[in-house]
């Protein structure tokens, strides 16, 4: 009768609410594989004859921490739905912390403070692209590539990657995938969650390779004499995840017009739903994209805002001809897809132009893309909800289900979207308020617009702010307090707030 | 013909009523209370047995049947009965009644082993959309893929002075592609000729092209244009079927359903309809939503009394054209008394549809008028018919009128000099008692 006693014990233990040990164990399993990722910059460092021990040491620490956590979870009862949120939220906190180790261990004066290194790593994994560096090219080539690489890993998602590679996570994987993939719902590409994750990652790798190849060809053929293989790969690594890090000091400004246009195209891809892209590119069903309401709205906003901005630039005489059109399109696409590259230093642009850029930061990419912020589909559905509200004011008895691509959207999903948008705006307001307050107490001096831009940019995982934190500037002047606030905003923004905030509710921890 | 009717409810009784004269009928039902009245009223065999039992069917002698009609109110029982009948009497034609759209679809795909499937909901919706399509129509039916339309109109004081009180031949406005096949006044029916005078209170049965039917509607009830806004009260199966068909004809539909879940499901299924979750009996609601502005209102709720009250209320609020679903046959008179324009009995339209299969195989379609006092047949003429080769002016009149002919797939509305040819499909109006005779002569 020992079996029944054991069951009894399990039941009693489950009453704690959250199965801590199992959750930590899974977190350990997920993070320990980061030590494999560190091998890539290690190899580069050896190739470039740069110090490689920071990477090796970091890899060893990551492996030890991961294995240690895994040990905690050994023999723990299996984890369930509730623990899923914990795993996702904490994995991202840990991944950024462990990913910051190479920065710290390298001893580079720009990144030797833990807060700064953590900011840089969080900005990398969450594909934000904000940086505390003031002199980027001063870093080693291998360290620069690690920066780029963290964004590439974070873009499609470290957990999605784990799902694709590790067989163990299959059960319960859907919840983890849904928490990590942006947007309200995950589009299934296959019956098994693992195959879906694999297809998404394969498409992601293929698009990255395609962009790197095109840019490299531009370099070899002399179309762009600033572009070399290093830059081509580095920028492909941060375009597809809508990251925005660049090993260049002035973002992509030094590159030729042709390269910038290629980056515009790939940023546009990156802001689209990857499941939809998979259907269009791999299964060759172009009509799917034309019929998709979100894709249509996404492209319409991109084009309309680009034209509006181009007219403003041309009207004010800031840029002319192709340059006006290119810079307008580049900045709009970069800000809206939440990539954060800049083809020119836009902080000198007039207020209306900046309003456009700040505005599109709140729109974001499509659901299921690598982009951040609120996402086009949520705006679309919120618009439909508002239209229904107005209609029901006049006709209280009318029953109007809301449809997306002809399919009725569940009222629960709509409520969740409303809640998400409110939380998003709430966290943005609190974040901007804290940054402004901090500036008043301990500096640095900034305008209200700068504080707003910094909060919107980090929460939306965009990257550049305004003022000293503009696209060619740095987040270094912010105080430590503001830096921590922005680290939290990036973390919240990448996981779309809810999985994190759920952990802060009382009912989460209770039985 | 030997016909088995399984189910002696309203549909079954109506079928018996229509077919007992010319065919040998056997009626099966589990309820003796339904069988006895039929046995007393008509010369039919009644058997108290379960039609969905193979043994009961065999014992009743189904193997000699030519036609098996399963028309109980239970879809599955009908399906089972037809399946057993197919086993016991492989040569019999089987017809089932169902309200399940899935069965109809399966049958259309040829995956259901029955010969015909008839749905009360679909037939009712057909009847109602046809009425709404033609203003002033009491009843309509279409033949030859919609090329020929049969309409029964009511003549009122508001009808055009060009037709009122005049002999037909004197009125210069009669649409060309049409023929008045009958004038009914009270219980008296006359087959009109050029001298027949039309008066208010008459009911006319006209066979013609859809355009002519529309034109007749304009003449007899001027000022009622095309319908764009119809309010359907009640989101049951019938109400939804009606709404769906109206929407398919690009007629705007507003549907009122009190049940929250049901209203929501309808709104999800019919994206183009405007669905209200309301009872439809609330004057404030009717006022606020301008229900009075609707050109027509259909009452498809489950209870006759509710339909009656709602229809009257809608009339009070200004709806001119009201159509009600009738469940109890007597309700028809109640509705007529309180001014409801058209009534449709789902069971009757179902029976009508089923009765078609009992006719001569040359007969393609049948419509019933005035509670089955008259029928409109669609028959292909045989070469041996005494009428073939005659000019229309020379044909003897024996209580039947040819309203239209379909030749080589095209509708022709014959004039006195036209000649009937063998193989023509003719649309014939006649009294129900003469159907067999008409089929014989043609």
Image (spheres, rainbow, N blue to C red):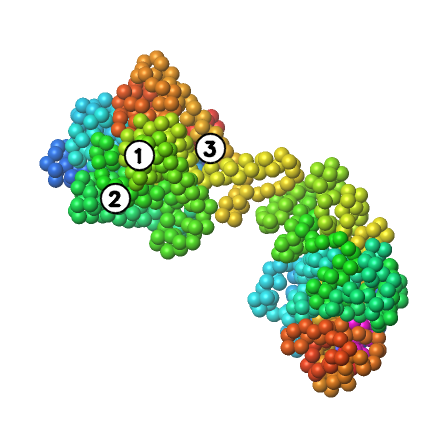
Q: Main secondary structure of the magenta part?
A: helix
Query: In the rendering, which numbered label is found on residue A476?
Result: none
Query: In the rendering, which numbered label is found on residue A258?
Result: 2
Residue behind mark 1: A319
Q: Is residue B340 visible?
A: yes
State which quarter of the image contains the C terminus of chain B: bottom right
- Image coordinates of residue B271 in percent, x first then y, are 58, 48
Q: Is residue A15 left or right of B14 when viewed as pictured?
A: left
Q: Is residue A11 left or right of B95 when viewed as pictured?
A: left
Q: Earlier in the sequence, mark 3 or mark 1?
A: 1
Q: Is residue A113 left or right of A180 when viewed as pictured?
A: left
Quarter residue A503 falls in: top left
- The subunit carrying tag 2 is A
Residue behind mark 3: A420
- Image coordinates of residue B293 in percent, x first then y, are 72, 44
- The subunit carrying tag 1 is A
Give the extent of the magenta segment.
Answer: B429-438
Mark 3 and mark 1 in contact? Answer it, CB < 8 Å: no
Q: Residue at x 36, y 37 (%)?
A: A310
- The subunit carrying tag 3 is A
Foreground label between 2 and 3:
2
B88 or B220: nearer the viewer: B220
- The residues bearing labels 3 and 1 have C-alpha atoms spaced at a distance of 38 Å
A465 or B265: nearer the viewer: A465
Q: Residue at x 17, y 45 (%)?
A: A222
Callout 3: few (<14), some (14-19), or many (20+) C-alpha neighbours within 10 Å?
Answer: some
Foreground label between 1 and 2:
1
- Image coordinates of residue B64 in percent, x first then y, are 72, 78
């Amino acid at each position: 009768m020992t079996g029944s006693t054991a069951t009894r014990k399990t039941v009693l233990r489950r009453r704690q609410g959250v199965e801590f040990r199992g959750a930590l164990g899974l977190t350990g399993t997920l993070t320990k594989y980061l030590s494999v990722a560190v091998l890539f910059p290690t190899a580069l460092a050896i190739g470039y004859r740069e110090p490689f021990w920071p990477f090796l040491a970091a890899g060893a620490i990551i492996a030890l921490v991961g294995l240690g956590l895994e040990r905690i979870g050994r023999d723990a009862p299996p984890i369930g739905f509730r623990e899923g949120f914990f795993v996702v939220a904490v994995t991202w906190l840990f991944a950024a912390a462990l990913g910051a180790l190479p920065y710290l261990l390298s001893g580079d004066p720009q990144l030797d403070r833990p807060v700064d290194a953590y900011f840089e790593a969080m900005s990398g994994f969450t594909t934000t692209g904000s940086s505390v560096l003031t002199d980027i090219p001063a870093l080693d080539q291998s360290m620069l590539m690690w920066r780029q690489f963290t964004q590439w890993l974070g873009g499609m998602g470290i957990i999605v990657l784990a799902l694709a590679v590790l067989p163990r996570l299959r059960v319960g994987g859907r919840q983890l995938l849904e928490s990590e993939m942006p947007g309200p719902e995950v589009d299934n590409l296959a019956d098994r969650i693992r195959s879906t994750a694999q297809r998404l990652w394969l498409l992601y790798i293929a698009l990255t390779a395609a962009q790197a190849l095109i840019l490299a060809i531009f370099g070899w053929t002399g179309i762009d004499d600033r572009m070399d293989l290093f830059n081509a790969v580095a920028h492909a690594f941060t375009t597809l995840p809508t990251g925005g890090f660049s090993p260049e000091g002035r973002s992509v400004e030094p590159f030729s017009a042709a390269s910038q246009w290629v980056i515009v195209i790939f940023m546009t891809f990156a802001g689209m739903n990857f499941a939809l892209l998979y259907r269009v590119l791999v299964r060759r069903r172009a009509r799917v994209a034309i019929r998709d309401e979100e894709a249509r709205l996404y492209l319409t906003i991109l084009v309309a805002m680009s034209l509006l901005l181009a007219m403003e630039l041309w009207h004010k005489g800031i840029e002319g001809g192709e340059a006006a059109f290119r810079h307008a399109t580049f900045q709009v696409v970069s800000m809206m897809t939440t990539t954060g590259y800049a083809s020119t230093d836009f902080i000198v642009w007039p207020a209306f132009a900046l309003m456009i850029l700040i505005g599109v930061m709140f729109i974001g990419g499509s659901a299921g893309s690598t982009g951040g912020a609120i996402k086009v589909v949520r705006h679309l559905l919120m618009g439909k909800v508002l239209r229904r509200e107005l209609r029901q004011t006049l006709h209280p008895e009318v029953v109007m289900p809301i449809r997306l691509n002809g399919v009725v959207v569940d009222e629960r999903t709509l409520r969740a979207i409303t809640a998400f948008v409110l939380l998003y705006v709430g966290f943005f307001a609190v974040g901007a308020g804290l940054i402004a307050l901090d500036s008043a107490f301990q500096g640095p001096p900034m305008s209200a617009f700068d504080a707003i831009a910094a909060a919107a940019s980090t929460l939306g995982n965009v990257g550049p702010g305004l003022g000293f934190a503009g696209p060619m500037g740095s987040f270094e002047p912010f105080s430590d307090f503001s830096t921590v606030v922005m680290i939290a905003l990036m973390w919240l923004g990448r996981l779309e707030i809810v999985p994190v905030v759920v952990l802060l509710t009382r009912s989460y921890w209770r039985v | 013909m030997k016909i088995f009717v399984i189910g002696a409810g309203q549909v079954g009784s109506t079928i018996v009523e229509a077919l007992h004269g010319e065919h040998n009928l056997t009626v099966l039902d589990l309820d003796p209370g339904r069988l006895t009245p039929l046995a007393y009223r008509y010369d039919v065999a009644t058997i108290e047995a379960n039609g969905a039992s193979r043994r009961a069917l065999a014992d009743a002698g189904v193997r000699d049947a030519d036609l098996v009609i399963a028309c109980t109110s239970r879809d599955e029982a009908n399906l089972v009965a037809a399946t057993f009948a197919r086993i016991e009497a492989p040569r019999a034609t089987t017809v089932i009644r169902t309200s399940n759209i899935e069965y109809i679809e399966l049958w259309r795909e040829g995956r259901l082993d029955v010969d015909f499937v008839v749905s009360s909901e679909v037939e009712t919706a057909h009847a109602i959309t046809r009425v709404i399509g033609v203003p002033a129509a009491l009843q309509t039916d279409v033949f030859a893929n919609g090329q020929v339309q049969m309409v029964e109109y009511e003549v009122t004081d508001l009808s055009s002075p060009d037709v009122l009180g005049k002999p037909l031949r004197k009125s210069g406005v009669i649409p060309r592609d049409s023929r008045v096949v009958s004038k009914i006044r009270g219980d008296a029916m006359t087959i009109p000729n050029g001298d027949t005078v039309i008066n208010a209170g008459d009911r006319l049965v006209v066979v013609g092209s859809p355009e002519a039917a529309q034109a007749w509607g304009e003449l007899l009830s001027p000022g009622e244009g095309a319908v764009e806004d119809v309010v359907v009260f009640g989101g049951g199966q019938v109400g939804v079927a009606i709404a769906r068909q109206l929407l398919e004809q690009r007629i705007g539909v507003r549907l009122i359903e009190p049940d929250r879940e049901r209203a929501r499901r309808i709104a999800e299924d019919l994206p183009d309809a405007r669905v209200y979750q309301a009872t439809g009996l609330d004057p404030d609601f009717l006022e606020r939503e301008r229900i009075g502005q609707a050109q027509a209102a259909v009452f498809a709720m489950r209870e006759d009394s509710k339909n009656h009250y709602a229809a009257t209320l809608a009339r009070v609020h200004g709806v001119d054209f009201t159509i009600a679903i009738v469940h109890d046959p007597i309700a028809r008179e109640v509705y007529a008394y309180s001014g409801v324009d058209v009534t449709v009995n789902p069971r009757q339209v179902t029976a009508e549809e089923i009765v078609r299969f009992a006719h001569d195989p040359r007969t393609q379609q049948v419509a019933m008028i005035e509670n089955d006092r008259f029928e409109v047949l669609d028959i292909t003429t045989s070469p041996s018919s005494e009428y073939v080769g005659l000019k229309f002016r020379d044909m003897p009149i024996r209580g039947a009128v040819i309203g239209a002919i379909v030749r080589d797939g095209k509708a022709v509305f014959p004039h006195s000099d036209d000649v009937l040819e063998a193989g023509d499909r003719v649309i014939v109006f006649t009294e129900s008692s003469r159907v067999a005779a008409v089929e014989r002569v043609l």
